Amino acid sequence: MTRLFQSNDQTLRRMCYLTIKEMANISEDVIIVTSSLTKDMTGKEDVYRGPAIRALCRITDTTMLQAIERYMKQAIVDKVPSVSSSALVSSLHMVRMSYDVVKRWVNEAQEAASSDNIMVQYHALGLLYHLRKNDRLAVSKMLNKFTKSGLKSPFAYCMLIRIASRLLEETEGGHDSPLFDFIESCLRNKHEMVVYEAASAIVHMPNCTARELAPAVSVLQLFCSSPKAALRYAAVRTLNKVAMKHPSAVTACNLDLENLITDSNRSIATLAITTLLKTGSESSVDRLMKQISSFVSEISDEFKVVVVQAISALCQKYPRKHSVMMNFLSNMLRDDGGFEYKRAIVDCIISIIEENPESKETGLAHLCEFIEDCEHTVLATKILHLLGREGPRTPSPSKYIRFIFNRVVLESEAVRAAAVSALAKFGAQNDDLLPSVLVLMQRCMMDSDDEVRDRATFYMNVLQQKQKALNAAYIFNGLSVSVPGLEKSLHQYTLEPSEKPFDMKTVPLATTTVSEQKTELAPVASSKLPEKLAPSRQDIYQEQLAAIPEFQGLGPLFKSSEPVQLTEAETEYVVRCIKHTFASHMVFQFDCTNTLNDQLLQKVVVQMEPSEAYEIVQYVPAASLPYSQPGSCYSLVRLPEDDPTAVSCTFSCTMKYLVRDCDPNTGEPDDDGYDDEYVLEDLEVTVADHIQKVLKPNFAAAWEEVGDEFEKEETFALASVRTLEEAVNNIVSFLGMQPCERSDKVPENKNSHILFLAGVFRGGHDVLVRSRLALADGVTMQVTVRSGEETAVDVILASVG
Amino acid sequence: AEVSCTFATDFEPSLYTVKAVLILDNDGNRLLSKYYDTELYPSIKEQKNFEKSVFNKSHKADNEIAFLEGLTIVYKSSVDLFFYVVGSAQENELMLMMVLNCLFDTLSQILRKNVEKRYLLDNLDGVYLVVDEIIDGGIILESDPQQVIQKVNYRVDENPLSEQSVAQVLQSAKEQIKWSILK
């Protein structure tokens, strides 16, 4: 390599630099060329100096860097712009490796920033920012200076805008600060790039009022009609973002956006459509739907999904337009498209059906038509399950039976099995259909697939008993326990032969899944990882607790609560608590983090003082808590036996530990320590900690199943509550039970409402609550509770009272 | 010693704006590709997959700008070549366009307006130098085509070797050796 340096051919020399840079990561011997590069860097030929600097810095390490420090400093302030730029850019690359060394060149960088060359200004600014970014005051002063001195470089302006908006965000500065004024003034810069950067920055600022957005939006509106596709794209993309938070601010641009629907660039067209869908008024929905249908066939699947999601949001906004949208969606279903696309449409239709009872029959009809010719098993089974759930309740359920039974005849095994389950639900719900269903079921018992035959036989037997309770347990409301938990319990049972039959109540329940809210609709990168079946949180805790010897013999874990913070943010010790409920005990898990780097905590325990009859059995300490490594300590508490209804309790908590001071740099602790304590916030245990939510898809059936043996009823007046909604929310969160049949949604303008809640009480018994609410002068509530166990009923009524 | 470009988290002001530059032919094969963000597609396989997706999306409609896999891509085509500049989804699209235009205009001048595959391949060393002068490690180094041309100072091979006969090549080789000994 050094030989090649002897040639005088410029191109060859330059190629040498490139090769050195490429080889920097591979070769260890590159230091040989260091002297040649240093010579070139300080030589007379300007053409070589810049590239030589860049190549040299690519292969330099910290010690070498100090050797050439002098040359670097000279290069940064060199009059030749390419040399200065190269030095500045290389310094930036090296900041990560040798921050302390590069920091010494701040003055040179500052001098370079006053250069006339637009690229040197940009690079100097970038380097200065990176060197100072942890010092907010320095950044602020720097910004002040540069915004006043009037740089020429459009790149530098863009960088300044970014720094300014970042600073505004960090300091939560008001929008009357000079920083905001600066950004706003950039909207009038003569360079389009700067104008766009400013508009984009304003739009992304949190807490922007419509008035502040207006100039940015009008700039973007102008860009929409630019001949340059990149500008139109940038404008539409940004307007799309504005429309998410401030749809009214964008309505002025609706006309321009509509023009863009026919843009030759499909990305622009799609973004225009989705923006219009967010800002459109109810009256424009029909027109929009027509425009979309003409254009949807031409765009790629990725974008089709985005459009469907936008339509879904629109459906929620204007529920009265459901018939128009339903028509449109069913047309889209009939067209060609990939799995993701069809799934998005099916999900959209299902959500319309769920939100809007009027649309149910049309929606179900469209879906039936779809499954007649659907190649995606997942979608067909999903729709069949939906039909099974909703179909029996429609005025004329018999028409769905034909569709379902056709699936049994024609489709693949998984679909046939789903169809059999759906048929069973019809038979269980509608007595007049029962004979026909039994006949069909008989035919299914001859199926070639064993899953189908098993299901058919099972359902036949249940249905033939003609008992509502059985129907409820086995057909309507399926397995509510967690499957891994069931597996473990069964295994345990087989290992210890016993006279008693297996008790389902000992199996921990499956925690109900929380449906995710999709808020951001911009197209995102498709995830590369396949979805793996992760063990549920509960299963993880079960394993962790089972590993602690003191907790053997507590039985299965019934419920684990969400973490409760017992310290405020930014305190010396951060502690949060998770409450684990067992059959007759509770374990409190305290996750503690020590945020002081000059202390080591040992033998950490959280001492608890209960307010009621709870009994502290023992503490399991965390052995040691070094700086910023979380650890856990536990407290085992027995539940009060003499008064089973006393489920609520308040514990005052104090963290007690042994402190050893240590050296912040090395982490070495002193030899001796001293005891200390730290008071935490009080911890509440409420009735909700003793109940696990369980969704019963068919509440009425479950009500019948539990029976009225232990039914009790009481009426309460909720004096401080003004609206039915507030009452419903309070009850749901207080009891910690699952609302069923969508009864947590109170229809508007109604004075009375019935709330259905379901759960399982500690010990494994179902608990059902039917609460009739009436709004007169304040809210009165008549609560009826049913359970298989009297204690549970008493507990609920006692806690509500 | 290793130097890695720190493509910072979203919305952090940074000079690192370009994630990759690609030049593909009209079958989608790569002629030149530089990935500045080393965490983006670390292996050759991933890079090639990315290039394939990008090519599929762009070669049918000449639309300047596209969005793919969470990245903004600006592109331009000429005869049988496709040029791409890749940035993050939050990047200023106009900035990326400036880079693309600078690259294209510079190459246009250097290759005497024949921006096509064969000519590009014959002068690939010059093309590498041009790219190196425009972007260094993900930072935009220069945006004015005239400046780039001056710095690169590359003279296109008037008589590329492939067009000459064997005798001519031997002759020119002899000349060059003679001159280098005499220097």
Image (cartoon, coloured by chain):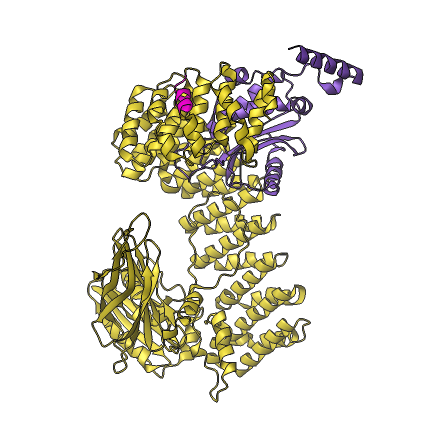
Residue A298, placed above or below residue A573: above
Residue B181 coordinates in the image, percent (x, y): 68, 13
Front-lying residue, A489 or A175: A489
Q: From the viewer's perspective, is A305 left or right of A701?
A: right
Front-lying residue, A27 or A417: A27
Asked where in the image residue A684 lies, by quadrant, the reply is: bottom left
Asked where in the image residue B119 lies, by quadrant, the reply is: top right
Residue A749 coordinates in the image, percent (x, y): 30, 58
Residue drawn where x is 28% and y is 72% of the image: A782
Front-lying residue, A478 or B14: B14
Tell which chain the image draws in purple: B
Tell which chain the image draws in yellow: A
Residue A636 coordinates in the image, percent (x, y): 31, 73
Q: Is residue A154 visible?
A: no
Residue drawn where x is 36% and y is 21% of the image: A113
Q: Which residues are magenta?
A: A70-78
Residue drawn where x is 59% and y is 67% of the image: A419
Q: Residue furthest bottom?
A: A499
Residue A521 coordinates in the image, percent (x, y): 45, 45
Residue A245, placed above or below residue A364: above
> What predominant SS class does the magenta segment belong to?
helix
Q: Is residue A204 visible?
A: yes
